[in-house]
Image (cartoon, rainbow, N blue to C red):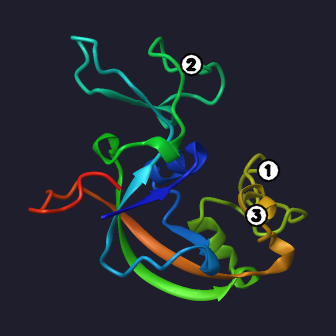
Amino acid sequence: MKPILFSTAMVRKILKGEKTQTRRVIEVRKPYKVGEILWVRETWANKSGFSNAVHPYLYKADYPESGIGNAKGFGKWKPSIHMPKAAARLFLEVLSVNKEQLQDITHEDAEKEGCYCIYENAIPYQHLKNQSFQSLWDSIYAKRGYSWNSNPRVYKYTFQVVDKPQESEGEVKDG
């Protein structure tokens, strides 16, 4: 099992069933494989040390965007990159892997990415407050040299949420 990072906003969309695709720059990583199970790294906090804690972790995606500066009295939120596998609650099975140019995304695929339009200046046909795929992409990748306008080659992954798999003998416990 390999980890995959998602922002809090995208984890919320996965939890609601509104996100079933993600694109990742080809030059940045090796591809995930069809059938592979990924564990989602998300913003989290540790509740361990509290005797009444049923589950030892909190997840930022479970709280409204406003008014959750700290982790409900458990300190600061920890970045998703530092989330250990033991804290993972979301697991994704890769259903398909395709290569394409970023700007070849369709409106249907933008919806599967959790967005409601492709271009920044397009009028979303559902909710004006939702981010376009173009602005979402640039907020993540433009600083890394992979802006929308540079139209990089990407892996397009389609996935579904699955139950936590059983650990197999000899499997690395953290990734």
Viewer-nearest of labels 2 and 3? 3
> Relative to 148, does residue 143 appear above or below in the rendering?
above
Q: Residues within 10 Å of mark 2 (few under 14, many from 20)?
A: few
Relative image position of residue 157 (x, y in whole percent): 50, 75
Which corner quadrant holds the N terminus?
bottom left
Per the image, the residue denoted by label 3 is 144
Per the image, the residue denoted by label 1 is 128
Q: Residues within 10 Å of mark 3 (few under 14, many from 20)?
A: few
Per the image, the residue denoted by label 2 is 70
Residues at discs 1 and 3 in contact (Cβ within 8 Å)? no
**What whole-number distance in Å separates the C-alpha atoms at marks 2 and 3?**
29 Å
Residue type of the residue flagged with mark 2 = Asn
Relative image position of residue 140 (x, y in whole percent): 71, 57
Q: Between disc 1 and disc 3, whose residue precedes?
A: 1
Residue depicted at 81% across the width and 69% down the height: 147
Residue type of the residue flagged with mark 1 = Leu
Residue depicted at 76% across the width and 55% down the height: 139
Residue depicted at 32% across the width and 48% down the height: 85
Q: Nearer the viewer, residue 175 or 22?
A: 175
Residue type of the residue flagged with mark 3 = Arg
Relative image position of residue 89 (x, y in whole percent): 32, 45
Looking at the image, residue 84 sits to the left or right of residue 6; the answer is left
Which corner quadrant holds the C terminus?
bottom left
Looking at the image, residue 55 sits to the left or right of residue 113; the answer is left
> Relative to 154, does residue 139 appear above or below in the rendering?
above
**What whole-number distance in Å separates the C-alpha atoms at marks 1 and 3?**
28 Å
Relative image position of residue 95 (x, y in whole percent): 38, 78
Residue depicted at 76% across the width and 64% down the height: 144
Q: Between disc 1 and disc 2, whose residue precedes?
A: 2
Secondary element at image label 2: loop
